[in-house]
Image (cartoon, rainbow, N blue to C red):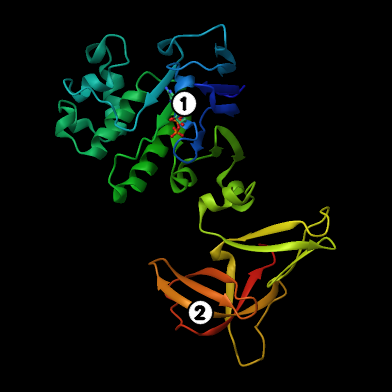
Amino acid sequence: PPRLEVQNLNRAFDGQRVVADVSFGVPAGQVACLLGPSGCGKSTTLRMIAGVDMQDSGRIFVDGKLVCDTVFRLPPERRAIGLMFQDFALFPHLPVSENVAFGLKGGHAANRARVAELLDRVRMTSHIDSYPHELSGGEQQRVALARALAPRPRVLLMDEPFSGLDERLRDGIRDETLALLKEEGTAVLLVTHEPHEAMRMADQILLMRDGRIVQQGAPYNLYNAPADRQVAAFFSDINVLTGRVRGALTATPFGDFLTPGLPDGTPIDIVIRPQHLKIDFDRGGKGPAATPEDGSAALARVVRARYLGRESLVEFRTEQDAIALNATLPGVFLPPEGTKMWLMLRRDR
Ligand code: ADP
């Protein structure tokens, strides 16, 4: 069985369902990210698994053993589930050594080896006698991580564990944290509202909306095969082309899309990520230099081009129908306003 398993969790507050039929499993050694906008029910889900809130229905298992259902409820401290919060919640009156040893019987005195091992792994050995207020945000985060892992939890729950940190440091700290989590081999459920963080950390993303998991899978699947337009829009800006089915096809400036099994007149949204558009210069009526993988090309004019660092964002308007389309192109690409170009979409997109 998966290390952590959640079956059909439901929770309502004042008659409002905030967690609706949530089910998933997290194997040992994997990081699952519960991702979604603020208020979608992520923390409530986490709190029920931790045992500090109680579901209305549904069951929670750790290593195949029932931890909680509607009649049986193991107290939080007996679930072998560790917790790490956004504000790290270190004890200000205790030194680093006692903070890390907090979940261990006998404190630091009885667990010197384990405390030393963890402080070494988070590179905080030289701070063993420091107090939390003497540490930077990143150092506090590492102590909090060491404390959460010290009792060797079967499952670790992390609630927005990087949001208190300087934006510029976050990716580095995320990568270090991920490396340590993988070494420990625990099952991790990480709550975040940041798609970038989920893409960077997750083996599996659980995308939540209005209390439900709308899609779950590897980052690649959510990005490239989103369940709906909203899921697509969660991970990057998107272009949306609207059309209607005619004879199992929907016409767009990039050619006809197959939309089988739908009656004529069905409205269709076709979602295209800006980085999946290709461009070619207009060579005076000669048409684009298309390859067999390209679909039809649409003639468009540049409305505005901006350089974003890693890429350039170019806004276009098609000559026919005046459809607005954004394209992101690698590097510096700043064509002047009004430049005529061919826009294409790779067939495999
Ligand atoms: P998220 O973590 O995704 O931001 P939460 O799980 O914190 O979302 O909250 C989901 C919804 O449940 C929100 O509308 C929130 O106001 C509501 N909620 C959470 N806890 C309580 C509570 N103890 N009493 C009433 N409403 C709550």
Q: Is residue 94 visible?
A: yes
Pick the front one: 292 or 277: 277
Work out how far the residue at label 2 is from the one at label 1, CA to CA, in angstroms: 46 Å
Q: Please give the name of the residue rendered at 28% of the width and 17% of the height, measured from the top-left corner.
A: 102
Residue at which label 1 appears: 44
Q: Earlier in the sequence, mark 2 or mark 1?
A: 1
The picture quadrant for ligand 1 comes to: top left
- What label does residue 302 carry, if any? 2
Q: Position of residue 304 (x, y in %)?
A: 45, 76
Residue 124 position by quadrant: top left
Give amino acid for label 2: Val
Quadrant holding the C terminus: bottom right
Left or right, 197 with reference to 268: left
Q: Secondary structure at mark 1?
A: helix
Q: Position of residue 228 (x, y in %)?
A: 64, 48
Dot 2 alpha-carbon crowd within 10 angstroms: few under 14, some 14 to 19, many 20 or more: many
